[in-house]
Image: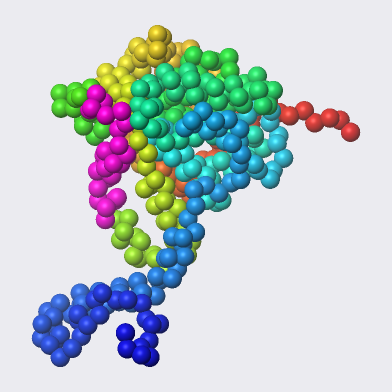
C-alpha cells in the first residue's frame, strides 16, 4: 500500500469489474442486472459494520442460571428469574438429543424459558451435553431411566415437591412421554411440543429415507460409536433445501441493515450450526423401533426389559404442534390423544414451523400465554402466609 493511501473503504473484490471504457460494450445487454449487483455491493459494504457487530454479540442462551447436577456429559440447569415464584410444582424442559437446548432461551424476547419464569414457575432444563465415543454404547434406556430420572429426582430433592411438570420438545417430548408412562406418580402435568408418536411408513420424507429396504441402520451403527452431526444436519437441511439454502440468504441480503433482524438471524445461525453427535445405540433404537417398526404407537417399544405403554399416562396433557412443521408433521403428534389415558387433554396448533414453535413471534404472542396459563391452572400454588 502506497504512503497516504486511504483505508476507510471496505475491501471490494468486485471493484473495477463493471467500470472502465469497455464496460458498456461488454456488459451493455446486462445493464439492469449490473446495476442491481452494484447496488447490492454498496448495501453490503454499508451494512458490514452492523453485520459484524451482530455476529460478535450472538450468545448461547440469555437467562442467568446455575448448574445443580452433573453427570458427564449431562448437566441439569436451574434458571434464575426476576418474577416471584407462584407455583410449588417445578418445570423441567426436556429437549431432543440431536441439538443444543438453548434454542428455548435464544433471546430475551424469544425465550420460552422466560415465559415460564415470568409466569411464576421454578424452571429447569436438562442439557444432554456432547457425547464422547465412550458414551456410544448408551441406549434410550440409559437416557430415560438414567439421566432423565436422576434429573427429576434431583429437582424433587431440591424443591421438596412430590412431582414435576415436564415440557418435552420434539424427540425430547417423546422421551418425556416414555418417562411419564413409567413414572406417572412423579409427573403432575405433561406438555408436548412437536413431539412425534406415529411413524406410519411413507408418511414423511424422513420415514421414506429410513425405509429398511434402503437404509441399513445396523450397519451404520456397528461402524461407529457416534453418529456425526453432519449426517443428521444435512438430512434436516434437505427436507427444505430451497428455504434452507436459498431463501434464508435472500432474506438476509434484503434485511442486513436491520439491527433487530441481524440479532435474531445470528442467534439462530449460532444455534443451527452448533450441532452435536448422537450415541449410535440411541440412534439405532430410535430409527429401528420408531421410524422403521412404529413400535411406540403399538405399545411395543422396548426400553430395557420393559415395553412402553403410553396408556399408563393419566395426568393432564397439553399437545402443542406447528402447522408448517417440516421435521415433525402434526399428523405424527396428533395420535398421542388416543394413546394416553388422560381425561384432561388439550391440543393447540399455531401457524409456525418446527423451530418457530419456540422462537416465532406468533408463538410468543399467541401460544405461550395460553400454555403457561394452562399449566398454572394445574400446578400446585405456593401457599402465602396470612398477614
The residue that appears at 26% across and 33% down in the rendered structure is 206
> Overall secondary structure of the magenta stretch?
helix
The residue that appears at 29% across and 23% down in the rendered structure is 284
Q: Residue furthest top?
A: 305
Q: Quadrant of residue 368?
A: top right
179 in relation to 307, above or below = below
Q: Quadrant of residue 47?
A: bottom left
Q: Residue furthest right?
A: 387
Image spot of residue 60 (x, y percent): 49, 48
Number of marks present in the image shown: 0
Image spot of residue 275 (x, y percent): 37, 42
Task: State whether residue 352 appears in this view.
Answer: no
> Would residue 263 appear left or right of 20 to someone viewing this image?
right
Task: State whether residue 209 appears in this view.
Answer: yes
> Would residue 55 appear left or right of 42 to someone viewing this image?
right
**Image coloring type:** rainbow
Q: Quadrant of residue 291?
A: top left
Task: Tell me the quarter of the image containing the C terminus.
Answer: top right
Q: Which residues are magenta?
A: 220-246
Image spot of residue 96 (x, y percent): 42, 33
283 in relation to 32, above or below = above
The residue that appears at 15% across and 23% down in the rendered structure is 213
The residue that appears at 47% across and 46% down in the rendered structure is 359
Q: Is residue 234 magenta?
A: yes
Task: Tell me the quarter of the image containing the N terminus.
Answer: bottom left
Amino acid at each position: 500500500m502506497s504512503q497516504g493511501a486511504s483505508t476507510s473503504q471496505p475491501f471490494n473484490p468486485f471493484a473495477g469489474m463493471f467500470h472502465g471504457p469497455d464496460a458498456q460494450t461488454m456488459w451493455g445487454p446486462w445493464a439492469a442486472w449490473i446495476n442491481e449487483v452494484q447496488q447490492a455491493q454498496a448495501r453490503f459494504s454499508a451494512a458490514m459494520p452492523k453485520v459484524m457487530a451482530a455476529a460478535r454479540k450472538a450468545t448461547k442462551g440469555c437467562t442467568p442460571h446455575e448448574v445443580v447436577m452433573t453427570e458427564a456429559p449431562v448437566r441439569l440447569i436451574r434458571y434464575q428469574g426476576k418474577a416471584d415464584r407462584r407455583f410449588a410444582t417445578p418445570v423441567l424442559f426436556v429437549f431432543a438429543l440431536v441439538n443444543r437446548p438453548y434454542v428455548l432461551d435464544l433471546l430475551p424476547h424469544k425465550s420460552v424459558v422466560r415465559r415460564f419464569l415470568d409466569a411464576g414457575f421454578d424452571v429447569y432444563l436438562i442439557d444432554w451435553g456432547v457425547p464422547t465415543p465412550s458414551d456410544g454404547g448408551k441406549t434410550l434406556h440409559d437416557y430415560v431411566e438414567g439421566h432423565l430420572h436422576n434429573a427429576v429426582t434431583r429437582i424433587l430433592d431440591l424443591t421438596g415437591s412430590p412431582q414435576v411438570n415436564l415440557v418435552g420438545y420434539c424427540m425430547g417430548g417423546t422421551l418425556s412421554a416414555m418417562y411419564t408412562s413409567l413414572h406417572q406418580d412423579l409427573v403432575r402435568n405433561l406438555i408436548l411440543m412437536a413431539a412425534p408418536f406415529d411413524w406410519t411408513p411413507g408418511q414423511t420424507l424422513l420415514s421414506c429415507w429410513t425405509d429398511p429396504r434402503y437404509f441399513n441402520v445396523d450397519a451404520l451403527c456397528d461402524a461407529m460409536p457416534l453418529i456425526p452431526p453432519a449426517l443428521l444436519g444435512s438430512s434436516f437441511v434437505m427436507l427444505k433445501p430451497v428455504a434452507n439454502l436459498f431463501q434464508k440468504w435472500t432474506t438476509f441480503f434484503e434485511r442486513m441493515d436491520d439491527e433487530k433482524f441481524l440479532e435474531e438471524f445470528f442467534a439462530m445461525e449460532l444455534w443451527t450450526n452448533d450441532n452435536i453427535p448422537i450415541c449410535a445405540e440411541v440412534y439405532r433404537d430410535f430409527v429401528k423401533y420408531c421410524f422403521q417398526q412404529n413400535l411406540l404407537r403399538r405399545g411395543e417399544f422396548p426400553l430395557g426389559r420393559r415395553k412402553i405403554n403410553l396408556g399408563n399416562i393419566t395426568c393432564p396433557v397439553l399437545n402443542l404442534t406447528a402447522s408448517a412443521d417440516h421435521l415433525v408433521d402434526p399428523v405424527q403428534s396428533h395420535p398421542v390423544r388416543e394413546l394416553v389415558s388422560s381425561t384432561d387433554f388439550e391440543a393447540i396448533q399455531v401457524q409456525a414451523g418446527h423451530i418457530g414453535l419456540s422462537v416465532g413471534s406468533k408463538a410468543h404472542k399467541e401460544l405461550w400465554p395460553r400454555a403457561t396459563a394452562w399449566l398454572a391452572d394445574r400446578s400446585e400454588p405456593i401457599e402465602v402466609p396470612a398477614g
